[in-house]
Image (cartoon, grey):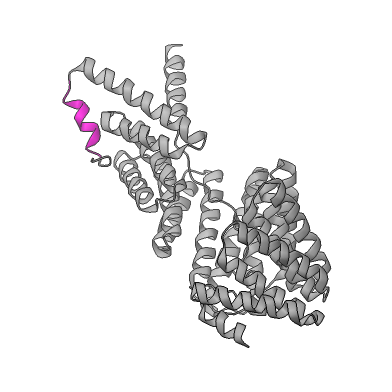
C-alpha cells in the first residue's frame, strides 16, 4: 500500500497496533546436547 | 549444494571408521563454531559454519536436527524466510522420522513462526496446534506457554493482514475483530501459565502483545493496563528497548482515551529513550507523535517545534515520505497560528515532495 504524506486524522496515530514483541524461536543447542551425552556416559560408568 | 536432505548423514556411512570419526569431530567443531557465532548475533557467519558442518555430515541425527534448527533460526533472523522454512521443514521431517517428540514440538513451533511471517496463517495454525498438542501430551508447561504465545501472534498478524483503510481501532471488519479476539484469548491463556511458572520475561512479552491486541480491538483501558505491566517488567530487566516500546504504545492508547497530556508525557519518555538508544527513526516517530499531540492540545508552537525536529531527522535519514508529512503538519500548524507565509512555504514544500514521490492523494491535498 502506497504511503501518503497527507495523512487523515485517523492515521496520525498508528492504527497498525503499535510495536510488537519479538518472536520466540525454539533453540536446539549442539553444545547442550553434548553436555547431556557426556553427563549420561559419566553416570552410566558410576 | 544440497545442504538440506536427510541423505547427508548417509555420506559418512560409506567411509571407513577412522574417517567417519574424524568427520564426526569436524562436523561437531563446525556446528559449535556456528552456534557460538549465532549467539553473538553474527548469523551470516554462523550460517557458513552450519552449512559446512552439513557438508561434512554426521551419523548422529540429534546433532543433525540441532544444526537444521539453528540454520532455520539463523535464516529467520536474517529475514531469509524461504531458507528458514526449508531448514525448519527438514528438522520437522527428521524429528518425526526418529520419533523425537520434544524435537518435533520445537520444529513445529519454529515452522509456525516462519509461516506466520510469510502470511501463511492457516498452515501456521496447524504447526502451533501440533506444538501445543505435544507439549500437553508430555506435560511440558513451558512448551504449552510458548505454543499459546505463538498462536496469539499468528491470530494477531492474521487480523492485521486483512486490509482495512482508514478505520480506527475497534471499528475494523468483523473478520479482523474475530482474529484479534482469538489472539487475545491465546495471550490470556499463555499469561495464566507463565504467571504460574513465575516467568517474568515471558509475561513481559505477552503483556506487550496483548496490549497491542486490546488497542486494535478498541479496548484502550485494557490496552493501557497491559502496557503498564509490560513497562514494569521492562524496568525490572533494565530492558530499555522494551521500555521504549511500552511508552510509545501507552502514548497511542492514551490518545484514544482522549488523555492528550498523559499521552504527551509518554511520548516524551519514548523520545528520551530513543535518543539514549541512538535510534534516529524512532526518535523521528516520537517527534511526529508529539507534534500531533500538541496539535490536539491546540498548543501550535510546541507542535511546530516537534514537527521541525521531525523534519530535520527525516531529511538526515533521506526519508522523503516523513519529510512530506512534517511539511504537511507544519503547514497546518502555521495556518492555525495565522502565519500564512510559513504555511504557504511548507505547503509548497509538501507539494514538491508529493510530485517527486508520485504521491497523488498527498498532491491533491496539498493543492487544496
For the image, the number of numbered tags is 0
| Quadrant of the rendering where the C terminus of chain B is positioned | bottom right
Kindly indicate the quadrant of the structure image that contains residue B315. Answer: bottom right
Q: Is residue B169 visible?
A: no
Q: Is residue B20 placed above or below B109 in the rendered structure?
A: above
Instruction: Find the residue positioned furthest to the bottom.
Output: B368
In the rendered image, residue B184 lying in the magenta stretch gets the answer no
Looking at the image, residue B153 sits to the left or right of residue A7; the answer is: left
Q: Is residue B185 visible?
A: yes
Instruction: Find the residue positioned furthest to the top.
Output: A46
Start and end of the magenta stretch? B6-15
Looking at the image, residue B156 sits to the left or right of residue B22; the answer is: right
Residue at (37%, 39%) from the top-left corner? B100
Q: What is the x, y in percent for residue B353? A: 56, 73
Magenta span: helix, strand or loop, mainly? helix
In the rendered image, residue B13 lying in the magenta stretch gets the answer yes
Residue at (81%, 68%) from the top-left corner? B302
Q: Is residue B91 placed above or below A36 in the rendered structure?
A: below
Q: What is the x, y in percent for residue B292? A: 73, 71
Q: What is the x, y in percent for residue B73? A: 43, 44
Question: Foreground residue, B305 or B86?
Answer: B305
Residue at (35%, 53%) from the top-left corner? B82
| Quadrant of the rendering where the N terminus of chain B is positioned | top left
Q: Is residue B256 placed above or below B280 in the rendered structure?
A: below
Looking at the image, residue B286 sits to the left or right of residue B167; the answer is: right
Q: What is the x, y in percent for residue B235? A: 74, 45
Residue at (43%, 24%) from the top-left corner? A34
Question: Foreground residue, A15 or B357?
Answer: B357
Looking at the image, residue B216 sits to the left or right of residue A31; the answer is: right
Question: Foreground residue, B87 or B137?
Answer: B87
Amino acid at each position: 500500500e502506497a504511503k501518503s504524506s497527507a495523512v487523515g486524522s485517523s492515521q496520525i496515530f498508528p492504527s497498525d497496533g503499535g510495536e510488537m514483541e519479538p518472536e520466540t524461536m525454539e533453540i536446539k543447542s549442539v553444545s547442550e546436547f553434548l553436555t547431556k551425552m557426556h553427563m549420561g556416559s559419566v553416570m552410566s560408568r558410576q | 549444494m544440497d545442504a538440506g536432505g536427510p541423505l547427508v548423514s548417509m555420506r559418512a556411512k560409506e567411509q571407513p571408521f577412522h574417517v567417519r570419526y574424524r568427520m564426526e569431530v569436524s562436523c561437531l567443531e563446525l556446528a559449535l563454531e556456528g552456534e557460538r557465532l549465532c549467539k553473538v548475533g553474527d548469523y551470516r557467519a554462523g550460517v557458513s559454519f552450519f552449512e559446512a558442518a552439513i557438508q561434512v555430515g554426521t551419523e548422529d541425527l540429534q546433532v543433525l536436527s540441532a544444526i537444521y534448527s539453528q540454520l532455520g533460526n539463523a535464516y529467520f533472523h536474517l529475514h531469509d524466510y524461504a531458507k528458514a522454512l526449508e531448514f525448519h521443514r527438514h528438522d520437522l521431517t527428521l524429528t518425526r522420522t526418529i520419533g523425537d517428540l520434544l524435537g518435533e514440538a520445537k520444529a513445529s513451533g519454529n515452522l509456525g513462526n516462519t509461516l506466520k511471517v510469510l502470511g501463511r496463517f492457516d498452515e501456521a495454525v496447524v504447526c502451533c496446534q501440533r506444538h501445543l498438542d505435544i507439549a500437553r501430551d508430555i506435560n511440558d508447561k513451558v512448551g504449552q506457554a510458548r505454543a499459546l504465545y505463538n498462536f496469539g501472534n499468528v491470530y494477531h498478524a492474521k487480523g492485521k493482514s486483512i486490509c482495512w483503510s482508514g478505520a480506527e481501532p475497534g471499528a475494523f471488519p468483523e473478520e479482523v475483530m474475530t482474529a484479534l479476539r482469538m489472539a487475545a484469548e491465546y495471550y490470556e491463556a499463555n499469561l495464566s501459565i507463565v504467571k504460574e511458572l513465575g516467568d517474568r520475561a515471558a509475561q513481559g512479552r505477552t503483556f506487550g502483545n496483548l496490549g497491542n491486541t486490546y488497542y486494535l480491538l478498541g479496548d484502550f483501558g485494557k490496552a493501557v493496563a497491559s502496557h503498564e505491566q509490560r513497562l514494569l517488567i521492562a524496568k525490572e530487566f533494565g530492558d530499555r528497548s522494551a521500555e521504549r516500546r511500552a511508552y510509545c504504545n501507552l502514548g497511542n492508547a492514551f490518545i484514544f482515551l482522549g488523555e492528550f497530556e498523559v499521552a504527551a508525557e509518554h511520548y516524551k519518555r519514548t523520545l528520551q529513550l530513543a535518543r539514549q538508544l541512538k535510534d534516529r527513526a524512532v526518535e523521528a516517530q516520537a517527534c511526529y507523535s508529539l507534534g500531533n499531540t500538541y496539535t490536539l492540545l491546540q498548543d501550535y508552537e510546541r507542535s511546530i517545534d516537534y514537527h521541525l525536529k521531525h523534519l530535520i531527522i527525516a531529511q538526515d535519514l533521506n526519508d522523503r515520505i516523513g519529510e512530506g508529512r512534517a511539511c504537511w503538519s507544519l503547514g497546518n500548524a502555521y495556518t492555525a497560528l495565522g502565519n500564512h507565509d510559513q504555511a504557504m512555504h511548507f505547503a509548497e514544500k509538501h507539494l514538491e515532495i508529493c510530485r517527486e514521490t508520485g504521491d497523488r492523494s498527498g498532491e491533491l491535498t496539498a493543492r487544496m
